Image (cartoon, rainbow, N blue to C red):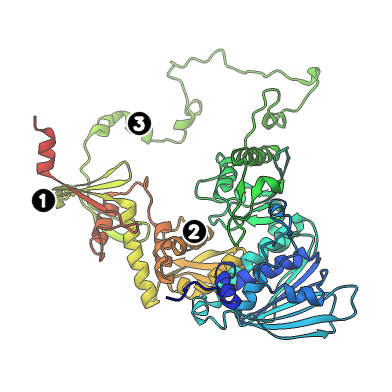
Amino acid sequence: MSDIIQLLPDSVANQIAAGEVVQRPASALKELIENAIDSGADKIQIIIKDAGKSLIQVIDNGCGMSMTDARMCFERHATSKIRKAEDLFAIRTMGFRGEAMASIAAIAQVELKSRRHEDELGTCIRIEGSEVIRQEPVSAMPGTSISVKNLFYNTPARRNFLKGNPVEMRHINDEFQRVALANPEVFFTLHHDGNEVYHLPAGSLKQRLIHLFGNAYNQKLVPVEEATSIIGLKGYIGKPEFAKKTRGEQFFFVNNRYIRDPYLNHAVLNAYEEVLASDSFPLYVLFIDIDPSKIDINVHPTKTEIKYQDEKAIYAIIRSAVKRSLGKYNISPTLDFNQETGFSQMITPKAHEDIIPPQIAFNPEFNPFTAARTEREIPFLRNAGEERKTVTKNWGSLYEIVQPEARQETFELPGNRNIEIENRHLQSTGKQIFQLHNRFIISQIKSGFMLIDQQSAHERILYERFSQQLESRQGASQQSLFPQTITLNGADFELVKDLLPDIQSLGFQIREFGKNTLIIEGIPADIGPNISEVDMLEHLIEGFKNNQSALKLNKRDSLARALARNTAIKAGAALSSEEMNILIDELFGCEMPNISLSGKPIISTFTIEELIQRFEK
């Protein structure tokens, strides 16, 4: 029997590696920008076409490459960043594995032009599917220009898994923002399909934040700075009053490398615990400077996960530094036993001789029991006229039992249009309904009673209603008296643009208004008036993203779930008997009245026999 184990060809091995390193156009762009930064460039231009599917071009003015280096950079595990294994624990550069360029060249058509500053001519290399098509000297500007065309052209299965242009562009925006924030001293431009999306001049971190997210952020930022023997921490956090319902603008950088770390994120949220609502998310951009020997970044190919030697100490430092910044800038409550600043501004110092003691005037002849009292002496009876006389005569009528009359009342249940019904006694209908702890509804049935979770029930009602509106695309809308504007980050703005037809079919009236800004002119008619339009849209975006990542639902189902959960009545809301009746009737009109959106039961029934057994001795 012949041997069956064989060495894979380089082209196949590179395609396998590309599955981890290059997952979508945004992954390729990230690797190219990081290589440009490692080359020492202070000016980087990015050109995108068709959301990166047709073209990703990165042009920098870095150190450039020689002819040999230009050819070697496409080999697997060829890198200028490390020389030996010990260098893995002293990494300060963005790249170090030497896999990115080889992986990109294996699944795309790549053209590289590079020239060192001291050379007169540069070199041009064209590669398709790991195969070098041409290499020749060319005239080029100092630095490097890399064009990645037709990504995944030779792996059609991978290309078919790419999402639509708005979704892919949203991921590109995410990667671009992270690299731009980590390098505010570098000039960046980003063009997509001929339009300039970002123009970011070199400057400070605060200027970079304002250029990325808008001028309004100038008033939202609070600086954070802490230097310890373990880590150095600096950056900015957002004021609590500007917190959003979406968790988009939260960035952690370790040695200028963007990371995802739920543990450190919890440290920041814990510092905001007393000044921020539980469903709000603050802005923060924090940079951690730490000795590379105390961390391990060689955990995942995307390099967004890091292991620390002393994780608990880093957690405590971040929490205390954020908390101190909130208190230092009078954002969180402070307690000073020597001087309370809140009262000091209310006290105006005066000279002792300028202080005038208060004077009290009274009538020594006044007798409250004399009959000569006038209406002037009794202010609350002034202009009472004959009404004052009739009160003492007909005082007994105050204790007579007044028979209630049937009357017409108008009430509003959140998620329902105004309904005019007749307020009759429940005894006449024979149907007993109660609310327990403003959370559950108890309704009497023939065999006993049923217990209904009011929030889950209303979520089910709204979900099925919104699903029908998305199918028929005929959602009713109510015009806002005062249209509201909302500014989103680039990723969320692209997401809303992608979802806009479906959002409008629910009843929203939204239109674009400048860069990353929307105007909300109307909301669904089924939603109560006490919900903020801006909060509603932010909740909708956050809920949609959570549904997409956790449940893998389709677009319309995710929208219906997110809107239903955000606009349904919550536990703790008091309901009238009429509102409870309507809620029950609409619940049993649903296709699945017994199951909540999370898959748990909405209704629990208890029989008379079960109650009797509980009291039997």
**Mark 3 to mark 2 CA distance (whole Å):** 59 Å
Neighbor class of circle 1 (other Cα within 10 Å; few <14, some 14-19, many 20+) is few
Q: Residue 601: where, in percent of width, then height?
A: 27, 53
In the picture of the structure, the residue carrying the numbered disc 1 is 446
Closer to the camera: disc 3 or disc 2? Answer: 2
Q: Residues within 10 Å of mark 3 (few under 14, many from 20)?
A: few
- Mark 1 or 3: in front is 1
Percent of width and height locating residue 347: 72, 28
Labelled disc at residue 285: none
Q: Amino acid at mark 3?
A: Lys
Element type at mark 3: helix
Where residue 539 is drawn, which disc sits there?
A: 2
Q: Residue at point 58% right, 43% down? A: 267
- Which mark sits nearer the N-terminus, 2 or 1? 1
Quadrant of the image occupied by residue 1: bottom left
Assign a secondary structure to mark 2: helix
Label 1 and label 3: CA atoms lie apart by 55 Å
* Separation of marks 2 and 1 at Cα, in angstroms: 41 Å
Q: What residue do we see at 77% from left, 82% from top?
A: 124
Left or right: where does residue 203 sit relative to residue 536? right
Q: Is residue 214 visible?
A: no
- 462 above or below 75? above
* Position of the C terminus by quadrant: top left
Residue corresponding to mark 3: 389
Considering depth in this image, is 581 or 369 the residue closer to the camera? 581
